Amino acid sequence: MTDTLSKLAARLALVERELTRTSRTARLAYSSIENGAIEIHDEDGGVRGVIGQQPDGTTGAIAVNGPPPPTPSLPLVEPALAGLHVTWDGAFADALAAPLDLARVQVHLMPSADAVPDVRSPTATIEAGSGASVTIARFSYEGLWVRLVAVNTSGIPGPASAAVTAKPRQTSRNDLAFGAVGPDNLVAGSVTAAALAADAITGKVVTGGVVQTGTSGTRLVMSPTAGGTGVPALALYSGHPQETAPGTVSSTTTTVGTALQPVARLEAPRVDSGHAELYLRSPAQGGLGSFELDANSARAYCYIKGSGATQTGASRIELFAQDGSAGPASVAIVEGTQVFLRSGLAKTVLTEDGLSVDGDTVRLNSLTVTKDGWLTRSGEAWKPIAFASGWTGYGSQYGVGRFRLYPDSTLALRDLIRRTQSSAPAAGEVLFTLPAGYRPAISVQVNLHAGTVGGALSLTIGATGSVTINNISSAAATYLSTGSGYLSLNNIRFPVD
């Protein structure tokens, strides 16, 4: 019995020691929060904090449902240049110290002393719990009331402070008076293009200086001498790697005779010795206006010139183009009621009286007029006749039988043709047929001599192109039945309609 009691007493002592050791160990020393959170509750069971994973997926220690913070003390509000300088000293009107869950103090600018601040849209915030200052810029100089609202880390605002009023300060009666800011007040490069309105610089004169959009590459440079000595101009740099001179836009005056006339010039940038430019001269003091557009190089030259005229004179436009640096050239001149064209040694003049051509030929599409007055038509040479059976061209020096269409829409036949059959010819026998385009609109009949005395017949050329013999005399029939009789088509010519 005694042994059993001893063992029981030893076991109780061991349990007591283990219990003592366990009570001295942290309760969550070897614990973790797996995809969850620990909520902290107050004595009434309300949630006051969440440690771990938050409802929005983030992780941390967040205070919730905290009590509203106390009322901030009155702010110190001082006028600032175009604004207000607000200072909070870190104290509270109804508390001795800041609550530990204070997040920030909102600064509200109100239109009146009793206006209620909207905690969703503060004008500024003070983040330091011990107090700080903030300067708020304003675009007017009207008086405003400043109220402070404390917000805790739970996002709950407290009561607003009493209102303190002040007005933004102006530098002078009219803000920035004329001449108040001079060159000494500006830092070099502080005025940029974004700060200048399109009409900010008006009526000002820039003399003796250079205005440019860049220092290299494609750029514009306005200079007092870009157009030559004493001629201001806008220089145009193309950025071409071989550019030897920039283009220019300039204006000056020139004296023509006794007339002083204004001129303007636009010249493209140069790469080699050639150039391209537009020259304009306005009429003045009796001098006539003119223009010239030209392109000149070591390879060729061309231009267009125009000049005005007096009330009774003739204005003039001239066009010139050269074939190579030393080749022939062509020119066209329109002057009043006259048009003059020249190419090489040939020239044409068109006036009210008609067209005058000084050259070897005049060509109008397929029609050619030679300098001797002859008319020819391209593509219309003598064509051989396709004979019907029993007829052929005589051959040798008498020809093979041909036809040709002339520019005056007449068709000519020529050469001797021979009948090869030994039988007597019959009226209506077909000799050949003319192709379409070479036929008369109505039948044409020509009387021909055939063989010996009394040999006669009629050659009928129908609108279908068939050429037949008719009205054959007995002497002509006998002559043509020999197999060697012939007819002459020479001097037969008729209109083709």
Image (cartoon, grey):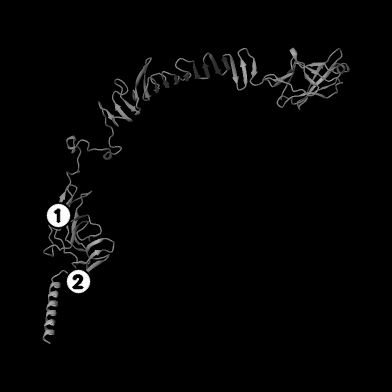
Q: Residue at x 64, y 17 (%)?
A: 375
Residue 372 horizontal side relative to residue 10, left or right: right
Residue 337 horizontal side relative to residue 484, left or right: left
Q: Nearer the viewer, mark 2 or mark 1?
A: 2
Q: Which mark is residue 132?
A: 1
Q: Which residue is mark 2?
A: 42
Which three-letter amino acid code belongs to the residue tagged 1? Ala
Question: Which image quadrant for residue 398?
Answer: top right
Q: Position of residue 166 (x, y in %)?
A: 16, 53
Camera-nearest residue between 318 and 338: 318
Which three-letter amino acid code belongs to the residue tagged 2? Asp
Quadrant holding the N terminus: bottom left
Cβ atoms at labels 2 and 1 below 8 Å apart: no
Placement of 13 over or under 399, stated as above or below: below
Q: Residue at x 15, y 72 (%)?
A: 22
- Work out whether mark 2 precedes mark 1 in sequence or the reverse, and give the earlier one: 2
Can you see residue 327?
Answer: yes
